[in-house]
Amino acid sequence: MMFGDVIDPRPLWKSPISLTMGIFPQYHSVVFIVSGHPTSPKHFRYKHIMRILSIGLFVILKPFSLAFGPSLRWTPPPIYTSSSPHFGNHGPVTSTTSLLQSPPSQLESIVDNAKSLVILDKERQDTLLSASASGLAVALAMIPEAIAFAFVAGVHPLVGLWTTVSLGFTAAALGGRAGIVSSASGACSVVVAALCASHGPSYLSACAMLAGALQILGGSLGVGKLIRLVPHPVMLGFVNGLAVLMTRSQLHHFQGIVWNSPQGLATYGLTGFTMMLCKVLPKLTKKVPATLGAIVIATLVAVGAKLPVTTLGDVAGASTFTGGLSVLPKLGLPAVPWTITTLKTVFPYAITMAAVGAIESLLTMQLLDGMMDDGKRGSTRKEMIGQGAGNVASGMVGGIGGCALLGLSLINVQSGGGISRWSGMSFAVFLALGLVLAAPLLAQVPLASLVGIMLLVCYSTFSWSSLRLLNKIPRLDALVIALVSIVTVKKDLAVAVLCGTIASALGFAWKQSANIAASTSTTAEVKTYNLTGPLFFGSTDKFQDLFTVKSDPSKIVLDFTNCRVFDHSALEAINTLSDSYGDQGKSVTLRGLSSDCAQLLANLQKGGKLPPYEIVEKHPATDPSYGVAEESSVYENISVKEST
């Protein structure tokens, strides 16, 4: 059933009709019947549906094309003349222009047009390969970390590994930016270790699911934006403390090994050899991530030379790397009684885990935003939702939950995986395939090679510039950096960030409280106070000390042109000062206040009106416009002038 000589001129992979006609000429009439003529409006209306159908036909019928070979090659249509009828948009028509030759088809030879079948261009192919190689390197480096975190939580190593697979893939797919790597984490494992010890692993999975639900709720409500309030000194303290923690966890692998014994020489030597490879390989080739190349070479050396070093199989046990379908986790809800009693047991751990995981993930995202310098900012909402969905997924496979890991994220970015989400997803895919299909090979990877990688990450994580700046930055900032670092190491990340943020806020308030000042000018009957600086809860006491109420003349002017009223405490301080002057039989004129201040000051007085000795002088053309930090209910009947 032929409809003429019209050939879709678009690229082959974009044209479902050309794709099917060129490869399967016997079936082109079927596609024409389904999709209509290539130039008909109906065809373009359903072009996306037709494209999917044609690709499906391609996949199904391709074996027939390969089997029958040249017999399926498309034959060019005959040359039409002006008298040759052919189908137009509304049936057979006669062309008014001679067609000396049919338009050349892209489908005359599949070999010649093979390039047009490639959907990914070279740049995308390079990105995909780079992200995949980075994901493989991260997967190898992740194994000992996930196993260690599983031991901290009190569960089997496989639980930590499958937590990493489910959480890592989901969080990378739905998270706030490319490059972030999520896994079972030490910060979260410490939080839930007591729950696992007292109630068992099932409660731990239920805790992970509840923590994930809380993170999804927080992300939907925009709670993640609060991470912007974390000061820079807190960020520096966070990375420094985390670097110390990671270094300490890596040095733990050397405990009990005598350095001059055969095992010690092999272990320390292989660690140093891996670190050296990470520095040398980038100078030789850029196609393979240095971390991946270093791990592979170190593994080959250890296996080939039969070095007496500890392997992943030795650390995790033989049952972890048995491989096969038997190691796959069971998908389902945790085996716990779904009652209020269970909720009361799990909720305190879940809310702590959700907070710790969200803070570490959001701080990691902010640090990667600064490192990548690609003009993109991660979404706090997406990151919290992605982490929450990942924790729910990990609970569904019997996992322990977790969050983003700064160290592994740095490996991913430094290996070239920060430009694509696939890097964070592929590491989970490679890890899952390795556990099922290549477990015996993974078991032979020497732990020393992975320790060498992580020690380099620890070195690059620590903010060495903060040490050089200690004598150049304010003492308060230096104190905050040290405080957060120490609390991160001794306690946990959430407490450290909270302590650092509170210390920074109080320090800032203390500094600003000293900036309130006033200059005076006096005439025969009027004394004017020209105020400067912020008036808020921290500066109200000093504000009161600026005035000599008893010795001042009968008329007082307070000029707030260069002073901003910030909060409720400032309003109370102004009214209290006015009352003091009123008790002395003196009047106070308030000048340069925001348009809403007069109404707010009146609302604080009895009856909702200012006393006769407290006068607000209004100049709409010059008065500033800003809102005082008050409850929204206070502003129900108050209008604020729009700032110009």
Image (cartoon, rainbow, N blue to C red):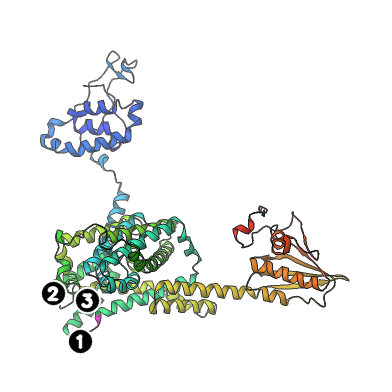
Question: Residue 305's mark?
Answer: 2
Disc 3 versus disc 1: distance between alpha carbons? 14 Å
Q: Position of residue 211 (x, y in %)?
A: 36, 63
Q: In percent of the image, x 35 and y 76: which residue is there?
A: 245
Q: Is residue 258 magenta?
A: yes
Q: Residues within 10 Å of mark 3 (few under 14, many from 20)?
A: many
The correct choice, above or below, for 555 with respect to 11 in the image is below
Q: Is residue 81 visible?
A: yes
66 versus 161 height, above or below: above
The segment highlighted magenta reads 254-259
- Residue 352, image quadrant: bottom left
Amino acid at pointer 1: Asn
Which residue is denoted by mark 1 in the rendering? 260
Q: Residue at x 60, y 61 (%)?
A: 631
Residue in the foreground of this view, choosing between 306 and 55: 55
Q: Which circle's residue, 3 or 2, is located before the other in the chain?
A: 3
Type of amino acid at the residue the image marks with label 3: Leu
Q: Amino acid at mark 2?
A: Ala
Q: Is residue 410 magenta?
A: no
Residue 270's disc is 3
Q: Residue at x 72, y 64 (%)?
A: 606
At which x and y percent is residue 329? 21, 60
Instruction: Say which of 214 and 263 sits in front.
Output: 214
For the stretch drawn in magenta, what is the main secondary structure? loop
User: Which of pointers 2 and 1 lies earlier in the amino acid sequence?
Assistant: 1
Instruction: Name the element at disc 2.
Output: helix
Relative to 3, residue 495 above or below: below
Q: Which quarter of the picture shows residue 278?
A: bottom left
| Alpha carbons under labels 2 and 1: distance apart | 18 Å
Extreme-left residue of the structure: 67
